[in-house]
Image (cartoon, helix red, strand yellow):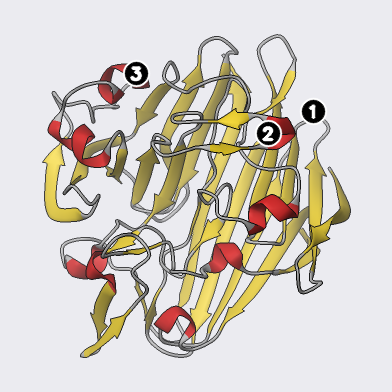
């Protein structure tokens, strides 16, 4: 394992971002920047041994500083949507940014994806990792509590990218961190993800309204386009006239994972038949948001044109809108308690 640090550009205020490239002995390479704790690239081989970057993104900081669909970023303080951009905690109502219609999305106008994180190379169990730290002050985006956040990225010799999330607050608050990576296992610049095959280890999903807000209803996936209990092509369900697909304008839903949360358990897998690339994902989180890239329209790496369905996201998380539904797992973090979660993306070929 090796880690190389280079400059990734500067903000208008002169703050320098860095790019860290992690490479293992098998040639897998992961690029990470401390701006937004963003995953910039993931290069893995196909079944013929040819390497491609399977992550949508940009070549330079300047493009990440502009509006973009959260490519590869760590989003928080609360990932995904909160209905009416408000929540009540300990009898007090907190009003958040309405940055998604009438709702709150991914931490607000300046969430964790738009912050410069402190970065350092650390050694854990004789493995070098990148640790990114951010201090979110009490009242930032109107969330309560001073929150210390750490995200650790580790690349293993088994072609696993491990993401460990940690947080602690001095007041009761809400925390729901995830990574918003967009994957295309053919390669970031090689068309759409419609013929990818997906399996999600889940028998139920949370029903959404036409604003992509979970209503509180939990529905079985059987007999619906939400049934990914075994590997299934994304195309069929995505192009269906199902009411839930219409609400999300594609897939933009949370699945209730069959996991215990005690350790990182298998949540699903993504397979691309042409390249033979397989990505398994494991998590301690209770849910995963499958988003089929329904609104992508931007020029990315090396001038690649990213359009609708050029990439997909598998965001491990607490359920969206969980603060409004007591039967959903809670995103409340009590003062002094430790928020600790792990997600693993493991790459191979089949």
Task: Pinpoint residue 196: horizontal percent, then vertical percent.
Answer: 45, 20
Mark earlier in primary sequence (2, 1)? 1
* Quadrant of the rendering where the C terminus is positioned: top right
Query: Badge 3: few (under 14), some or many (20 or more) residues near its Cα, within 10 Å?
Result: some
Q: Position of residue 250 (x, y in %)?
A: 30, 33
User: Do we see residue 290 in this rendering?
Assistant: yes
Mark 2 or mark 3, whichever is nearer to me: 3
Is the C-beta separation of discs 2 and 1 under 8 Å? yes
Question: Image height check: is 56 above or below 144?
Answer: above
Q: Quadrant of the N terminus?
A: top right
> Which mark is first along the chain, 3 or 2?
2
Residue 234 relative to residue 237: left or right: right
Identify the residue at horizontal 68%, vertical 43% (top origin): 58
Seen in the image, is 212 located left or right of residue 317? left
CA–CA distance between discs 2 and 1? 8 Å
Residue at the spot of label 2: 159
Residue 68: give x, y in percent of width and height: 55, 50
Dividing the picture into quarters, in which one does residue 53 lie?
Answer: top right
Residue 110 relative to residue 129: left or right? left
* Numbered tag placed on residue 26 in the rendering: 1
């Amino acid at each position: 394992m090796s880690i190389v640090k280079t400059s990734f550009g500067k903000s208008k205020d002169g703050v320098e971002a860095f790019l860290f490239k992690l490479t293992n002995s098998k040639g897998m390479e992961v690029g990470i920047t401390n701006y937004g704790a963003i995953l910039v690239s993931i290069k893995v081989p196909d079944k013929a041994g040819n390497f491609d970057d399977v992550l949508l993104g940009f070549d330079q900081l300047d493009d990440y500083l502009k509006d973009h669909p959260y490519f590869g970023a760590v989003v928080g303080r609360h990932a995904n949507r909160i209905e009416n951009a408000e929540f009540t905690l300990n009898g007090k109502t907190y009003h958040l940014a309405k940055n998604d219609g009438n709702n709150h999305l991914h931490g607000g106008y300046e969430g964790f994806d738009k912050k410069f994180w402190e970065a350092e190379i650390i050694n854990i169990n004789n493995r070098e990792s990148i640790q990114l730290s951010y201090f979110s002050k009490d009242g930032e985006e109107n969330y309560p509590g001073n929150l210390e956040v750490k995200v650790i990225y580790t690349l293993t010799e088994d072609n696993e990218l491990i993401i460990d999330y940690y947080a602690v607050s001095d007041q009761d608050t809400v925390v729901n961190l995830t990574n918003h990576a967009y994957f295309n296992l053919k390669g970031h610049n090689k068309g759409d993800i419609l013929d990818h095959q997906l399996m999600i280890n889940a028998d139920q999903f949370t029903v959404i309204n036409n604003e992509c807000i979970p209503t509180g209803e939990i529905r079985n996936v059987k007999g619906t386009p939400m049934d990914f209990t075994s590997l299934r092509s994304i195309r069929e369900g995505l192009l269906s006239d199902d009411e839930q697909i219409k609400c999300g304008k594609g897939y933009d839903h949370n699945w209730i994972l069959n996991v215990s949360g005690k350790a990182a358990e298998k949540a699903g897998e993504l397979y691309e038949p042409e390249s033979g690339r397989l990505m398994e994902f494991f998590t301690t989180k209770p849910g995963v948001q499958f988003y089929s890239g329904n609104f992508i329209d931007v020029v990315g790496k090396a001038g690649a044109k990213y359009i609708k369905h050029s990439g997909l996201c598998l965001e491990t998380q607490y359920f969206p809108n969980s603060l409004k539904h007591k039967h959903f797992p809670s995103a409340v973090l009590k003062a002094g308690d430790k928020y600790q979660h792990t997600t693993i993306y493991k790459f191979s070929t089949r």
